[in-house]
């Protein structure tokens, strides 16, 4: 679906005054980046020391973005901010040495006017703000009711059934009352599909046919390419396969941001399914084997993920890398591209180009942002946010509602605190974090002192292995924007 370059006005009060939600009780370890990426010295998270993103340094070429960042609206407003006023208000906060190299852009959401920035056209490493691109592409291309199915079909021979992965990594083995997303319980709309439910429905179908013993195979043929991206570390994300349970976590209840993961997540999912089948009185003969389901095989049972909008919200709030790669592959499948890292990146790029997002200088190699080879200019991130918040595009609203709230939810729960010097902005900023070694980014919406909504993207590269001073400096810039009636 094509997106017109709509004006970002505040039709939804939640955009102007986000309500603080419950914080995550488990918090964040001081040894990890705010969205789950390890900060191990000067490395890039994959054991290669200063990675490719660091070696590129500041040699990225600035690329022009013609026209307003967002489409023009009615600028005849006494409360409209000005670039001069905002630049004056930001003042020395932009000179903080903790920021290293700063690329940034700020725009007035109501008019689309670019207000202030530096290196705003220059591609920079986005880290997990890459998920904004994945999210907008998914919600633009996929129907609002799109859900990912995990199914069981009749196997190649009598007495054989096949568990078929559809690409939903959130299928869970936990009872619904034990499921936590970002430390919070789920509701009927956000609850993931249940492996126990799939086994129960399968057992019912088998028993109705007079069968109580089967041989099980499992099908992971939906995806192609490598299970791990060459820049992924296997810690902040596991193998990417279309059949998983609890995102491949060995302990699905673990609150760790980088939990131990199964070496073979598809095999783990099959074993989980077998356990639930046995509890339903179905005997499974031997060990489950990997096999491709017969074409046109009869479906015995299915479970489905939450709708794509809820998946996007979960992905953004908790910066879920595993889910981001799954969502990118759903975009690839819808675009008739291979369901791989390469195909997902190509499909996201093509869809964003189609809907009018400026893609000059953008390089995507994954859907999660763990790859340091990704490049996005700040103005592109601002445009993505503007499209998502525009009342002309309600289908993109989960991008905004999924953004963490400063000081209260998701990856911003421990940001904008009293000690950061940015506490006054807690609760009025919604933003997506991004962190890799030596890279910290933040992109979102903020309400200024006149009640005006601004969109911003701040992207930094430093030489320090300690990310916390940089994050605090970024938060202080956003707080200055919030305090400004400029």
Image (cartoon, helix red, strand yellow):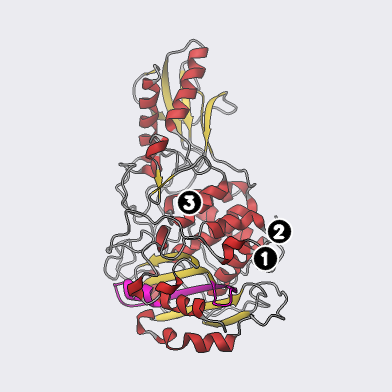
Please tell me which residue is depicted at 39% across the width and 47% down the height of the picture.
239
221 lies left or right of 23: right
Q: Is residue 109 above or below residue 92?
A: above
419 lies left or right of 352: left
The nearer-to-camera label among 2 and 3 is 3
Please tell me which residue is depicted at 57% across the width and 55% down the height of the picture.
398
| Numbered badge on residue 356 | 1
> Residue 97 location in percent, x, y?
36, 84
**Label 2 vs 1, first from the N-terminus:** 2
| Dot 3: element | helix
Gap in angstroms between the C-alphas marked 3 and 1? 25 Å
Gap in angstroms between the C-alphas marked 2 and 1? 8 Å
**Label 3 vs 1, first from the N-terminus:** 3
> Residue 220 location in percent, x, y?
46, 37
Does the stretch in magenta take in 198?
no
Magenta span covers which residues? 447-473
Q: Quadrant of the N terminus?
A: bottom right
The nearer-to-camera label among 3 and 1 is 3
Q: Nearer the viewer, residue 98 or 368?
A: 98
Q: In the rendered image, which quarter is residue 136 located in?
A: bottom right
**Label 2 vs 3, first from the N-terminus:** 2
Q: Nearer the viewer, residue 23 or 168?
A: 23
Q: Are marks 2 and 1 in contact (CB under 8 Å)?
A: yes
**Number of numbered discs:** 3
| Numbered badge on residue 314 | 3
| Dot 1: element | loop
């Amino acid at each position: 679906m094509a997106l017109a370059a709509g004006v970002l006005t505040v039709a939804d009060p939640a955009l102007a005054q986000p309500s603080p939600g419950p914080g995550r009780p488990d918090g964040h370890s001081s040894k990890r980046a705010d969205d789950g990426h390890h900060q191990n010295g000067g490395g890039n998270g994959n054991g290669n020391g200063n990675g490719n993103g660091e070696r590129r340094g500041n040699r990225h070429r600035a690329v022009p973005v013609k026209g307003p960042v967002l489409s023009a609206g009615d600028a005849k407003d006494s409360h409209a901010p000005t670039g001069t006023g905002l630049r004056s208000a930001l003042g020395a906060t932009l000179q903080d040495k903790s920021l290293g190299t700063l690329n940034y852009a700020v725009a007035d959401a109501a008019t689309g006017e670019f207000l202030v920035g530096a290196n705003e056209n220059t591609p920079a490493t986005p880290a997990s703000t890459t998920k904004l691109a994945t999210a907008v592409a998914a919600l633009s291309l996929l129907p609002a009711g799109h859900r990912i199915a995990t199914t069981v079909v009749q196997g190649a021979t009598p007495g054989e059934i096949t568990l078929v992965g559809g690409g939903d990594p959130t299928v869970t083995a936990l009872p619904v009352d034990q499921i936590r997303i970002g430390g919070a319980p789920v509701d009927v709309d956000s609850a993931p599909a249940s492996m126990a439910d799939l086994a129960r429905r399968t057992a019912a179908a088998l028993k109705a046919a007079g069968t109580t013993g089967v041989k099980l195979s499992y099908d992971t043929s939906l995806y192609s390419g490598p299970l791990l991206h060459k820049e992924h570390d296997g810690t902040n994300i596991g193998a990417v396969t279309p059949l998983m349970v609890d995102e491949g976590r060995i302990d699905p209840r673990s609150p760790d941001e980088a939990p131990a993961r199964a070496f073979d997540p598809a095999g783990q999912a099959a074993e989980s399914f077998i356990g639930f089948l046995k509890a339903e009185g179905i005997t499974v003969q031997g060990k489950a084997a990997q096999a491709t389901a017969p074409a046109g095989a009869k479906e015995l049972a299915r479970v489905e993920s939450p709708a794509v909008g809820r998946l996007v919200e979960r992905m953004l709030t908790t910066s879920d890398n595993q889910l981001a790669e799954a969502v990118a592959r759903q975009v690839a499948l819808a675009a008739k591209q291979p369901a791989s890292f390469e195909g997902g990146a190509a499909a996201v790029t093509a869809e964003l180009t189609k809907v009018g997002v400026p893609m000059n200088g953008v390089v995507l190699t994954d859907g999660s942002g763990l790859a340091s080879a990704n490049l996005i200019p700040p103005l592109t991130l601002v445009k993505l946010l503007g499209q998502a918040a525009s009342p002309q595009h309600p289908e993109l609203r989960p991008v905004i509602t999924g953004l963490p709230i400063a000081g209260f939810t998701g990856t911003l729960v421990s940001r904008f605190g009293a000690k950061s010097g940015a506490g006054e902005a807690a609760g009025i900023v919604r933003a997506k974090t991004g962190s890799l070694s030596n890279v910290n980014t933040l992109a979102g919406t903020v309400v200024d002192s006149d009640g005006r909504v601004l969109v911003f993207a701040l992207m930094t590269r430093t030489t320090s292995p300690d990310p916390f001073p940089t994050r605090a400096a970024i938060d202080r810039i956003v707080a200055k924007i919030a305090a400004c009636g400029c």
